[in-house]
Amino acid sequence: MASDLRLTVLGSATPYPAAGNPCSGYLVSGGGARVWVDAGSGTLGALQRYARLDELDAVWISHLHADHTADLLTAYYGLLYADVHREAPLPLYGPPGIADRVAAFLTHGDRRSPVERAFDVRELSDGHGARVGGLDLSAREVAHGMPAFALRVEHAGNSLVYSGDSAPCAALTELADGCGTLLCEADGDSADGVHHSPEEAGETAAAAGAGRLIVTHVGRAIEPGDAVTRAASRFAGPVAYAAPGAVFPVD
Ligand SMILES: [Zn+2]
């Protein structure tokens, strides 16, 4: 079966959305499945250029920082109180505690908001695997100073790995081993223990033997073009920037 694995960038800004660029969020599609990967501020709007909430097969959240999760809150309203009609709650993969975290924000009275009516919550752990439609998802816990996960998506021999937010770490390099495309954050200017610098993103791509590197979550102090140049100084393969609206076929 030919692979139609594809990455669409909904947004890549951090730590707050820019004009024209939401925070972290991606649509990963292939094998008839659509997965909303990270739900940063503004990504739910951008998502609807491609898919409605009732057309999604799953949401996958790397970690609970607001620039990766904030739009779960309004997605909850959409799923329960608007024009979205699903036969079952939307599968939501995320770090342990994600349901209570979302509910804590959404609850305004004595009764806890029924987050589980909107989302079928499935907590991630190191080595977690799931099949969503024709996509195989696997997760490793990575280094971000809090529970945080990277994602590998496989379809028909093609593979995409997303770092989430992470410093360079063995788990990420192992997860990305031999992948076709590595979508790696490049937030920091220097090694800070919780993020990659652009150079480190290049080094992780090289160590993993990735076919291609896409830098994302580029910090505000760094021009995207400079992030690409700096990453490419450590990685011989092609390097691109995760511009909002960009679509990358993964082969
Ligand atoms: Zn983070």
Image: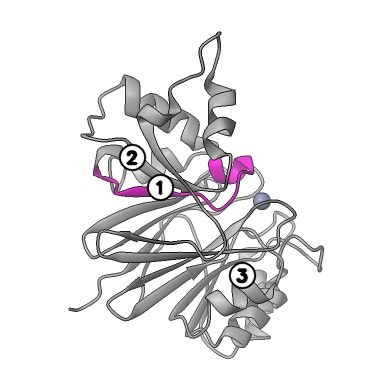
Residue 27: quadrant of the picture: bottom left
Q: Which residue lies most toward the left here?
A: 1
Closest to the observer: 54 or 98?
98
Q: Which residue is mark 2?
A: 90
- Residue 65 percent across, percent down from the top left: 64, 44
Q: How many marks?
A: 3
Give neighbour class at mark 2: few <14, some 14-19, many 20+ (Cα, 10 Å).
Answer: many
Q: Is residue 214 left or right of residue 153?
A: right
Residue 224: quadrant of the picture: bottom right
Quadrant that contains the N terminus: bottom left
Q: Secondary structure at mark 2?
A: strand
Q: Which residues are magenta?
A: 55-69
Task: Determine whether 18 is above or below 3 in the image.
Answer: above
Q: Residue at x 61, y 70 (%)?
A: 225
Q: Is residue 62 shown in magenta?
A: yes
Q: For the residue marked with disc 1, what is the amino acid?
A: Val
Q: Residue at x 59, y 33 (%)?
A: 101
Q: Which residue is mark 3?
A: 225
Mark closer to the chain start, 3 or 2: 2
Q: Is mark 3 within 8 Å of ligand 1?
A: no
Mark number for residue 59?
1
Q: Which residue lies most toward the top here?
A: 110
Residue 132: quadrant of the picture: bottom left
Give neighbour class at mark 1: few <14, some 14-19, many 20+ (Cα, 10 Å).
Answer: many
